[in-house]
Amino acid sequence: MSEFKNVGLVARMGSEQVLESLRRVRDYLASRGVSVFLEDTAQELLCETENDCEGFTQLEMATRCDLIIAVGGDGNILGAARTFAPYDVPILGINRGRMGFLADVSPDEIEESIGEVLAGNYVMEEHFLLEGEVSGMKEVPCALNEVLIHSAKMPKMLEFNLYIDDIFVYNQYSDGLIIASPTGSTAYALSAGGPIMHPSLDAIVLVPMFPHQLNSRPLLVPGDSELRIVIGSHIGTNAKISFDSQVEFEIEAGESICVKKKKELLKLVHPPGHSFYGVCRSKLNWASEKQRR
């Protein structure tokens, strides 16, 4: 018997390809005797032609499901991670997006890969999230990839002070700062010149965005560091804080945001044979071993 008896399906509204994969996943799970819970958005996708679907919120699914299958791109997993990580519910991704660093199951291998997972043949990876707290705010948003701080008025440079564990590090003028987890090192931070980090590393990378100092470089710090960014007040520029480019708010000059590792971890499920280096080789067009020879 599979350890995953109750499986939730989440998907973003999108293409016909997403709908086709979503239907295949649902039908295959049902054929294996698995109870399927459709997220409201996924339910809307399917029930345009089917009337017997029932939808659930992600919070409802978090308390009922043993596994979440996200159909779409990595952005779909980013959104799901914020909900399901605190409930210790693992996520498996079916890739219908562009890159597929996180959602790595090919649409051509849906039945085979899910069958392996249901049989207990899978790789489980733990990824930490970052949370950002602003004084006076009740909500503490979190991000799987990165917390982005940039000027609220573009194009305009932002000035800020960085403190790590209450130790002053530097004052900087730049377009902003990317604070990325190892998971996010292959996303926005990579485009800004940051290093590629293995998901198992317990570290956080800070990548300046077009800094005004030529000696400013990405900075790698221990994963349990507490980062505090104080927005400069003398130039009167507010800042915007973005979490995985999905949750965003503005803070005023003179205010600060504290970023640290979230206590709960995200569990990602991968089919047998998963390799981070293999994903990098495929997605980043690294030379194959045959080409190297």
Image (cartoon, rainbow, N blue to C red):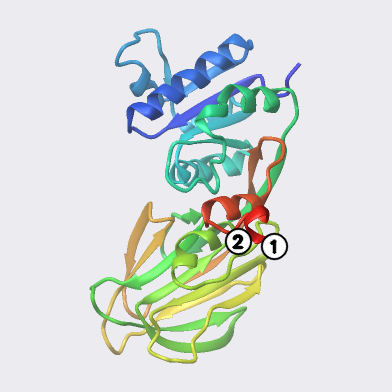
Local packing at callout 2 (Cα closer than 10 Å; few below 14, some 14-19, many 20+) is many
- In the image, is residue 24 above or below residue 10? above
**Which quadrant is home to the C terminus?**
bottom right
Residue appearing at x 48%, y 66% in the figure: 189
Among the two numbered marks 2 and 1 on one chain, the one whose residue lies closer to the N terminus: 2
Q: Is residue 90 above or below residue 25?
A: below
Q: Position of residue 103 (x, y in %)?
A: 53, 41
What SS does tag 1 mark? loop
Residue 57 locus on image (x, y percent): 44, 29
Q: Which residue is mark 2?
A: 182
On the image, which quarter does residue 35 sit in?
top right
The reply, left or right, for residue 28 in relation to residue 4 is left
Q: Residue 187's spot in the image, x, y percent?
A: 48, 59
Seen from the viewer's position, the closer of residues 95 and 167 is 95
Residue at 66% from the left image edge and 22% from the top image edge: 115
**Is the N terminus in the top left, top right, bottom left or bottom right quadrant?**
top right
Residue at the image point whose x is 49% and y is 66% from the top: 190
SS for dot 2: loop
**What residue sits right under mark 1 in the picture?**
201
Q: Position of residue 124 (x, y in %)?
A: 71, 41
Specify whether 206 is left or right of 138: right
Discs 2, 1 touching: Cβ within 8 Å: yes
Question: Given the image, on which type of amino acid does mark 2 rest?
Answer: Pro
* Number of other residues with Cα within 10 Å of mark 1, as a class: few under 14, some 14 to 19, many 20 or more: some
CA gap, disc 2 to disc 1? 7 Å
Q: Amino acid at mark 1?
A: Leu
Point out the residue furthest to the front here: 293
Q: Is residue 292 left or right of residue 174?
A: right
